[in-house]
Amino acid sequence: MRAVWLFFLIVVLYFFFHLMGWVGVMLSFLATVPAWGYFIIAGIVFSGYKVIEGVLEDKRADYEHIEREGQVFLDRMEEERKRRKEVQ
């Protein structure tokens, strides 16, 4: 599913740049960049991707931790409720 959204984003960005007339400018810029520049650009894009992936993974881990801690709290409340019922 992620690949479909990525493809859709790329198509939308292409059409946006095409409508704005920036495709030719970008192509002429890329034609003047030396070979090592492509590695730098690819590294920047890859680094940005890994940062976003890491942030999303941290959010998922935080959410799972909060869920576990919440469940522990609810279990303790339920045990306390049962204990109080037994005492009465």
Image (cartoon, helix red, strand yellow):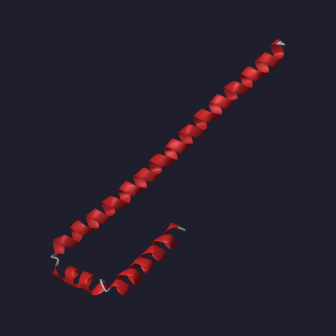
Residue at far top of view: 87
Q: Quadrant of residue 53?
A: bottom left
**Eyeballing the image, is 52 above or below 23?**
above
Q: Quadrant of the C terminus?
A: top right
The residue located at (77%, 17%) in the rendering is 83
Q: At which x and y percent is residue 80?
A: 72, 20
Q: Is residue 69 left or right of residue 58?
A: right
Foreground pick, 86 / 42:
86
**Eyeballing the image, is 51 above or below 5?**
above
Residue at far front of view: 20
The residue located at (31%, 65%) in the rendering is 45
Q: At which x and y percent is residue 39?
A: 22, 69
Q: Quadrant of the N terminus?
A: bottom right
Q: Quadrant of residue 70?
A: top right
Q: At which x and y percent is residue 66?
A: 56, 38
The residue located at (46%, 53%) in the rendering is 56
How many numbered marks appear? Answer: 0
Q: Is residue 25 left or right of residue 62?
A: left
